[in-house]
Image: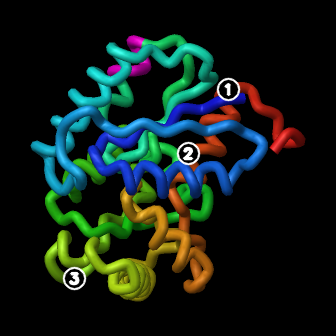
């Protein structure tokens, strides 16, 4: 089985990191990665999210996913998810869609992320995916998003602190780390709290593989 992971951001380093985590999460599946052909290296607001949607559509229009059994959209707003479902013949999975689905199995959940301007879009995704009654809201890291994202250890610490607030103040029974570029930091803190922390990229790989008919005994 082959899956195509599309990063709606332009950062090749972020794409490589997400592909590495995706492959590690399911070594028996071949996973390739592509970055957005235009846009921004980090989606932090609605305008950039819309540009990411356009970039993903342009990428697939110019490079149809022949030979793949599924596509993963690896930005937490799931840009172009509905568009691609109408334009390609293989299943398309978003990391927000997959992460929220796994979190909802544990009960009421929160999303933890670095981008306050995307909080409304995250809430819209939760409602659209049928989790409105379980979604508690978004817990944010403190400080400027670009400064937080620019320090790997600082990012992990900031995410951990936001996770703790989501559990203690919001009553979250599960947490979703909200963003493909947060994949490395999500991995670093995944086992450090008392509630399940859902890493969205591995969650999307699992869901994409199931949708493509990959049996569990093959993974």
Along the horizontal axis of the image, is 19 left or right of 180? right
Q: Which residues are magenta?
A: 83-87
Does residue 130 appear anywhere in the picture? Answer: no
The Cα–Cα distance between marks 3 and 2, rounded to whole angstroms, is 27 Å
Residue 82, horizontal then vertical, whole percent: 36, 25
The residue to which callout 1 is attached is 212
Crowding at label 1, few (<14), some or many (≥20) Cα neighbours within 10 Å? some
Q: Residue at x 72, y 29 (%)?
A: 1
Crowding at label 2, few (<14), some or many (≥20) Cα neighbours within 10 Å? many
Q: Residue at x 57, y 54 (%)?
A: 20
Q: Main secondary structure of the magenta part?
A: helix
Residue 75, horizontal then vertical, whole percent: 36, 47
Looking at the picture, tell me which residue is in the foreground, 47 or 184: 184
Q: Which numbered dot is residue 142?
A: 3
Secondary structure at numbered mark 3: loop
Residue 153, horizontal then vertical, whole percent: 40, 84
Q: Hey, which quadrant is residue 141 in on the image?
A: bottom left
Q: Hey, which quadrant is residue 74 in on the image?
A: top left
The Cα–Cα distance between marks 2 and 1, rounded to whole angstroms, is 12 Å
Report the coloring of the rendering.
Answer: rainbow
Report how many numbered discs are placed on residues in the image.
Answer: 3
């Amino acid at each position: 089985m082959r899956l195509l992971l599309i990063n709606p951001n332009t950062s090749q380093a972020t794409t490589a990191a997400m592909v590495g985590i995706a492959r590690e999460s399911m070594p028996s599946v071949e996973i390739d990665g592509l970055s957005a052909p235009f846009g921004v290296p980090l989606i932090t607001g609605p305008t950039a999210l819309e540009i990411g949607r356009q970039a993903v559509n342009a990428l697939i229009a110019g490079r149809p996913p022949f030979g793949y059994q599924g596509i993963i959209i690896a930005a937490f707003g799931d840009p172009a998810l509905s568009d691609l479902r109408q334009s390609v013949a293989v299943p398309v999975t978003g990391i927000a869609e997959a992460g929220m689905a796994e979190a909802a199995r544990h009960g009421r959940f929160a999303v933890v992320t670095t981008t306050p301007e995307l909080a409304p879009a995250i809430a819209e995704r939760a409602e659209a995916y049928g989790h409105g009654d379980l979604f508690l809201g978004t817990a944010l890291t403190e400080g400027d998003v670009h400064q937080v994202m620019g320090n790997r250890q600082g990012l992990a610490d900031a995410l951990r602190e936001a996770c703790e607030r989501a559990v203690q103040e919001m009553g979250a029974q599960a947490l979703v780390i909200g963003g493909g570029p947060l994949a490395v930091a999500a991995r670093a803190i995944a086992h450090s709290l008392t509630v399940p922390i859902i890493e969205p990229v591995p969650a999307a790989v699992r869901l994409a593989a199931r949708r493509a008919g990959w049996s569990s005994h093959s993974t």
